[in-house]
Amino acid sequence: MLLDLQNIYKWVQQGGQRVFLLKDINLSVNEGEFISIMGPSGSGKSTLLNVIGMLDDFNEGVYSFLDEPVHRLKEKHRSNLYKKYIGFVFQAYHLIDELTVYENLEMPLLYKNHSSSERKAMVADILDRFNIVGKQKLFPTQLSGGQQQLVGVARALIGRPKLILADEPTGNLNSRQGEEIMELFKELNAEGVTILQVTHSESNAAYGTRTINLLDGRQV
Amino acid sequence: MLRNYIKVAWRNLKKQPFFTFINTFGLAIGMAGGLLIALFVYDEFSYDTMFPEAHRIHRIDSDVKFGGNQFKMAEVSAPMAETMLKDFPQVEATVRFRDRGSMLIRKNGTETNSKELHATFVDSTFFSMFGIGLLAGDVNTALKETNTLVLTRSAAEKHFGVQNALGQQLILNNSDTYTVTGVIEDLPANSFLRNHSVFLAMAGYEDSRIPDWGSNNYFTFIKLVPSAGISEIETQLQSLFSRYLIPWAQESFPGITEASFLASGNHVYYSTMPLRDIHLYSNMDSELSPNSSMQNVYILSFIALFLILLASVNFMNLSTAQSLKRAKEVGIRKTLGSDKKALLTQFLTESGMITLISLLFAIGIAFLVLPLFNELSGKSMTLPVAEPYFWILVFSFTFFLGLLSGLYPAFFMSRFVPVKVLSGTGATASSGGGIRNVLVVFQFAISILLIIGTLVVYQQLQFIQSKDLGFKKDRIVMVDDIPRNPSQAASLKEEVARLASVEDVTLSSYYPTPSSRSNSSFFKEGYQDQENAINMQMWEVDYDYINTLDIALASGRDFDRRYATDSLGILLNESAVGILGESTESVLGIKISSDLGEENPVFYTVIGVVKDFHFESLRDHIGALGLLPGVTGGSLAVKIKGNNFSETLTGIERIWDKAMPDQPFNYQFMEEAFNTTYQAEQRLGRIFMVFTILSLVVACLGLFGLAAFNAAKRTKEIGIRKVLGAGVGQITYQLTFDFLRMVIIAIVISLPIGWYAMNKWLEDFTYRIDVSWWVLLLSAMIAMGIAILTVSYQSIRAAIVNPVRSLRTE
């Protein structure tokens, strides 16, 4: 098992009342799964994804990632964990505008202390694999949305994570670009990468092996 | 990793040229200002440190109260030096200077004089005491014989080279012949002898051997043996008063005792002043060279500190304000595995980079501005670029500045939570506004303080220059170096007086401009005892003096050629009359004399009283003064009719050249000569103004950037308001007022501080202005006005944007 959530609750205080963002979430993910999380706006999809990605805290429950009890880990340890095993893909791509494609791809490796030659080899590999060698010297603003998201996925993958968390990865793309990204996810999943995506679209969800539906922070 | 940081930083800087410019320019100005002032302060502290064993050299000062006047002098009596050498085993050597002022010098056999501004008699121990080597001549014989002298290199080169200087004969003031026995290097610009170029052998100065303990005319320096401490000397010094001064006084005033001397309110105190402290701590009635003061060093250091703080605060403000734009990057980096430490390092690297770039600009600016600053401060400083310690200091300072400015923004930015800044709804309004506001208040408070300072210093200077001094200094040209030969001087004066554009002419050595004078004791007829002696300055003037300078009479009459007895008449000023214990009427006809202890004293009859006029700096009270008729050399004061300056000057020069074809024609306007008294204040005023403007520029740059940022942040809000019907005026007002609130707080904080600080500064002046309410008001208004100008540009720009455009982007 890759990760396991048991009775996860998350709430915020608003006007003296608890507003639940997540309510009693139970979820186990095995390696190699491709899961889609669906639900209307405000149902807690992104919150759940952030909790799984350890970017956000939760108030109650037990979360273990590769048998490590995440809820008991210190911040530093947790960040080491996601640094090593998780890659993020965002709806708004979130590339660093001041860095070229090449440098954006190289950045996660810098934080993992790879040597310069290793980095070169890994970036070259991934550029190759995504067919964007010709774009490596361009800045994000010089790319189309689809190309930017391609770089976003490539960046998530470069550290060879076990899990990719994608928050509406096609939300800002047109349908053709969206399909390309989904095809790419399918391919990656076939290679053994576990994928967890948040999506609004049924057709995107159909690429996955399992769908989890949320409503008002609760699994339905 | 570092390369990545630098790359990102560099591209960020390039992407936002406006903010980059404000940041680097502000920092560069701050650093350049700091650098210049640091040079200044360093220079101030370097005075007289070049003399080997300077720490063992001390000057003996005296504080004398006698006959109603008190004098704090850097000079003591002639026998002091020899006595100390004899009585105090701790004293290894002594040297005395007896200042002679300016001198005309020509080589024997030539006719053309050159003028040396500062000549002094000096003991031959001068060289060994101060470790001064001779370029030509022998230390063991130089200045030993009477009528010998030593010149500095530049003085020597006016007449002959350094090489063949030895043995040359020089004529001083067209009368005395001196032989050159040595040449020394020009004395350093940061030494107490910087202006002196001619050193005459004390051996030929008769007065220096007379054991007169009552006149204090000798700058006396002692060198201690290495083991001795100055405090031992200091405690024993006072004993010389009873041991030598009292017995000497008893010769003139039989029956005087130490007790009776002290009982009549007189005193003589001796003290010591370390050589290296003279420049910053000594402030005596007379000094060998004008000094600075620790106060100036403090004031300037504070200004420098303020300026750098202002620039640093700008940096913090702009960086945190801009952080919105960097928030996304922080979020991404965090999700990609960067921890807080890495981010801190990144942002500190960035601020380090900006400070380094600023440093380059700052050094450039400092290079360009240094000549101006030198002029401003009256120094000749250079950037010590060849010295490694300079670079070490500059770089470590830059490092600290980068750290200081970068730390807060770095902490601020590295705290961003990725979930928040990366969520699709766009970045939330950045926090940190509170601290930014505090920093803006701080900046403006400092700027207002500096404005108040500038205004008050200028007002005081204005006050001094326009104060009714009791004489008229405008339209008066002083022609210097009038020959001592009475008939030659008189005919010169007569000829000048005949010029059509000349109203009045007078001849005297004494004018109410900075010059060296001395005091002497006087007594009323029938009271030839020390209790009733009064001490006053005595000026020999001619019959046209009162007239030419427009000095008013309080009673009696001016000198008059029709009364032959006026050659033994005297005019007193009101202060002198007061000390004599008379009224301006009752004093008329009283006879006074300075011939203490003589059998047939010469008496002068008081024929008139002049109103007190300011003949010394306005820092001091008006002392007692007597005016005696006498024909002397000195200077002609020529009062010019109307404004025919150049015509009159040409006329005078023609007369001069005819009478003395080989003498240099030197003149100055009395106004200028008078102003040299306040040179220090004028310098301070100018420096104050320059740095005030600089700090205002820096503060405004920051405010401008912050206003731009604020307007950008509120684009959406402004759009909504406009859609709901707000007018451009209302929005501009609202945006501007947010900043003005901070300026108002700054005003409230800084006005009382400024008022207090400037009153403290003014305490140094006997005649001074009060810090008036309108100066405070004006400072506040200036700050306010500048803030409004700075902010409203951005506010109006934001207010006139079409709301459709600003809302569409959401």
Image (cartoon, coloured by chain):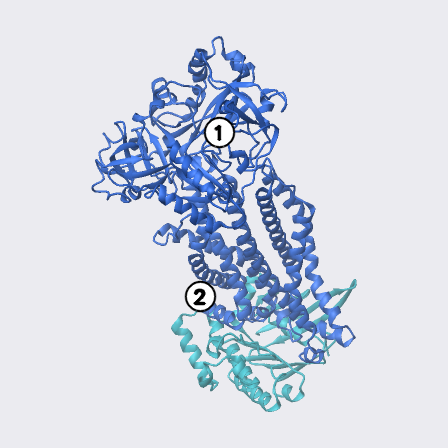
Chain colours: A cyan, B blue
The chain identifier of the residue carrying mark 2 reads B
Q: Quadrant of residue B100?
A: top left
Residue B746, visible in the rendered structure: no
Q: Residue furthest bottom?
A: A176
Rendered-image quadrant of the C terminus of chain A? bottom right
In the image, taking residue A81 as reference, residue B480 lies left or right, namely: left
| Amino acid tagged 2 | Leu
The chain identifier of the residue carrying mark 1 reads B
Name the residue located 68 percent from the left edge and 61 percent from the top edge: B739
| Amino acid tagged 1 | Trp
Instruction: Name the secondary structure under disc 1.
Output: strand
Res. B2 mark: 2
Mark 2 or mark 1, which is nearer to you? 1
Q: Residue furthest front?
A: B562
Q: Is residue B114 above or below residue A41?
A: above
Name the residue located 49 percent from the left edge and 10 percent from the top edge: B256
Q: Nearer the viewer, residue B365 or B245?
A: B245
In the image, taking residue A130 as reference, residue B137 lies left or right, namely: left
Counting residues from the start of the chain, the first of labels 2 and 1 encountered is 2
* Mark 1 residue crowding within 10 angstroms, few (<14) / some (14–19) / many (20+): many
Q: Which residue is mark 1?
A: B539
Q: Nearer the viewer, residue A43 or A136?
A: A136
Residue B59, visible in the rendered structure: yes
- The picture places residue A112, in percent across and down from the top left corner, at 47, 69
Q: Quadrant of residue B312?
A: bottom right
Rendered-image quadrant of the N terminus of chain A? bottom right
Q: Nearer the viewer, residue B324 or B51?
A: B51
Q: CA distance from mark 2 to mark 1?
A: 76 Å
Q: Is residue B154 above or below residue B562?
A: below
